[in-house]
């Protein structure tokens, strides 16, 4: 049906990422609601708020690891549908919450769902929508029966895209690769025909189908089962470690815990792209009432726009390593400046310094969107060996991203209560001592490199071969799979895959 149909499919499937952005951003406005704080008998800086935010990330840890299983067992389409159903349940529990336990369970379930369905650009769109819905809901009078709409409606809205995704996916095709992987070849050919046939290119569609079958057959011949093998093979362990590190470094740039410390609101922290506590931070800077929600709405537009420009026009021109170094250095300098501003404006009463504080908040978002925001996901997937790619990316995301995010979302308010604005320098020190040197000395540039070139870049043998210490355990399985492929009329092109002759002796 052509390019437009493919774009529509990809956009609709990205609704899962929209859900992540919305679910994260929505708490910015929810915790600014006086009715919400009164209903749960809490305040914006209490450990309860930290728990509400950290449980979301905690649930996502399990969702990410679960995705490694469900995609192989049920396919991409069913995995997204499972995530959408779970997200709808989590959203319903949150908006209907009558006590804290119900709200926390809802946040855990929503995080679990988001761990299954995630990409980058639509996250920003979700942030934008959540903020402006929150801004509109914030105008519900606090002294009327409509006051609960300040927080119940924004929480309820997240159910709508989840249901749209759940129902809409019924009409979306399954991934042709997955269909071929589970021996549903006829269905795969029909899907490819629907996606690419224009009335004249039947040969092209058939050729693509044959190429996918050949590739999958070769991949099966070298794929190694189990999770522990990722840690036993030195080459794979190194790449898994770097893939996890890029996620850890993304959290520890300071973007996910970007903090402000002001009295009388000392325990302030950002989590997930400066999302959860923006309105509190602006209040500490002297921006109060509806203005803090408005500024948050403007802020949430800046990052996604910068992210989109970077992805479409800059990323493949400048590579991966240079933007990461630029991001780590730039964010570190911004953190130092923000700390200096906050140390001189403890009560948020100095207008000039308050404006400077907001400027550096915006600056961090732009720098992050031009570096770690998109590149962390791209680099992680590019360096992951194809033999363990699904499991490896699930592990790196679950542990490096979500687990670290969960930890800091919970401990940041405690640390800020003890050392206030000096907490900035925890991240400054980590960036200077760990992140920047590691990226400079150990990260390899992967831009414009094929999967085979990346294998060789990390000291492995060419794509399509197993490390020597694994060959003896998998030769028979490789021969069996290759024989099966030949019986189906699909030859494995060893010349193209650069498979060494000894691999299949």
Image (cartoon, rainbow, N blue to C red):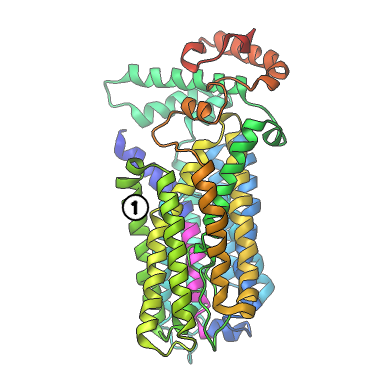
Q: Is residue 234 above or below residue 165?
A: above
The residue located at (57%, 72%) in the rendering is 423
* Residue at the limit of the structure toward the left, as seen here: 200
Quadrant assignment for the N terminus:
top left
Of residues 154 and 166, which is closer to you in this image?
154
Q: Percent x, y for residue 427?
A: 55, 64
Q: Percent x, y for residue 18?
A: 45, 56
Q: Is residue 102 visible?
A: yes
Q: Neighbour class for label 1 at 10 Å: few (<14), some, many (≥20)?
A: some
Count of residue discs: 1
Quadrant assignment for the C terminus:
top right
Residue located beneath label 1 in the image: 308
Q: Secondary structure at mark 1?
A: helix
Residue 463 sits inside the magenta stretch: no
Q: Is residue 6 left or right of residue 376?
A: left
Residue 29 sits inside the magenta stretch: yes
The residue located at (56%, 81%) in the rendering is 44
Q: Is residue 272 visible?
A: no
Q: Percent x, y for residue 354?
A: 39, 82
Q: Is residue 358 left or right of residue 109?
A: left
Of residues 329 and 224, which is closer to you in this image?
329
Q: Is residue 306 above or below residue 287?
A: above
In magenta, the rendered stretch is 18-34
What predominant SS class does the magenta segment belong to? helix
The residue located at (66%, 52%) in the rendering is 62
Q: Percent x, y for residue 363?
A: 38, 66
């Amino acid at each position: 049906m052509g390019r437009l149909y493919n774009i529509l499919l990809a956009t609709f499937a990205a609704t899962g990422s929209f859900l992540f952005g919305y679910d994260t951003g929505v708490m910015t406005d929810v915790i600014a609601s006086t009715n919400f704080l009164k209903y749960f008998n809490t305040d914006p800086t209490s450990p309860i708020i930290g728990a509400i935010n950290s449980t979301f990330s905690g649930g996502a840890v399990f969702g990410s690891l679960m995705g490694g299983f469900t995609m192989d067992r049920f396919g991409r389409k069913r995995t997204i549908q499972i995530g959408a159903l779970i997200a709808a349940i989590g959203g319903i529990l949150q908006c209907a919450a009558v006590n804290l336990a119900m709200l926390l369970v809802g946040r855990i379930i929503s995080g679990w769902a988001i761990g299954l369905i995630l990409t980058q650009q639509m996250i920003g769109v979700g942030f934008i929508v959540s903020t402006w819905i929150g801004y509109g809901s914030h105008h519900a009078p606090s002294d009327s029966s409509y006051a609960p709409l300040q927080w119940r409606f924004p929480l309820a809205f997240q159910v709508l895209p989840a249901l749209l995704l759940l129902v809409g996916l019924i009409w979306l095709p399954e991934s042709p690769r997955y269909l071929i992987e589970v021996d549903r070849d006829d269905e795969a050919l029909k899907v490819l025909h629907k996606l690419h046939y224009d009335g004249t290119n039947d040969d092209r569609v058939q050729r693509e189908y044959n190429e996918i079958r050949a590739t999958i057959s070769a991949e099966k011949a070298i794929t190694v089962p189990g999770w522990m093998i990722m840690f036993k093979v030195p080459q794979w362990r190194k790449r898994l470690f770097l893939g996890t590190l890029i996620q850890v470094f993304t959290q520890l740039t300071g973007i996910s815990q970007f903090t402000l410390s002001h009295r009388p609101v000392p325990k302030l922290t950002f989590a997930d792209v400066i999302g959860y506590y923006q309105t509190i931070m602006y209040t500490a800077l002297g921006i109060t009432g509806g203005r803090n929600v408005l500024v948050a709405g403007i802020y949430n537009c800046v990052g996604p726009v910068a992210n989109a420009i970077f992805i479409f026009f800059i990323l493949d021109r400048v590579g991966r390593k240079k933007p990461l170094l630029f991001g780590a250095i730039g964010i570190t300098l911004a953190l130092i400046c923000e700390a200096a501003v906050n140390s001189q404006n403890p009560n948020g009463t100095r207008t000039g310094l308050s404006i400077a504080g907001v400027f550096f908040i915006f600056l961090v978002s732009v720098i992050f969107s031009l570096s770690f925001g998109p590149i962390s996901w791209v680099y992680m997937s590019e360096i992951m060996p194809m033999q363990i790619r699904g499991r490896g990316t699930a592990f790196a995301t679950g542990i490096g991203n979500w687990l670290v995010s969960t930890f800091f979302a919970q401990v940041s308010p405690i640390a800020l209560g003890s050392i206030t604005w000096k907490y900035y320098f925890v991240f400054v020190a980590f960036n200077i001592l760990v992140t920047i040197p590691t990226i400079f000395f150990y990260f390899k540039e992967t831009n414009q490199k094929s999967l085979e070139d990346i294998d060789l870049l990390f000291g492995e043998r060419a794509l399509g071969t197993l490390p020597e210490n694994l060959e003896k355990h998998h030769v028979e399985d490789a021969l069996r799979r290759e024989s099966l492929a030949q019986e189906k009329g699909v030859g494995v092109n060893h010349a193209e895959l650069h498979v060494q002759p000894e691999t299949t002796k």
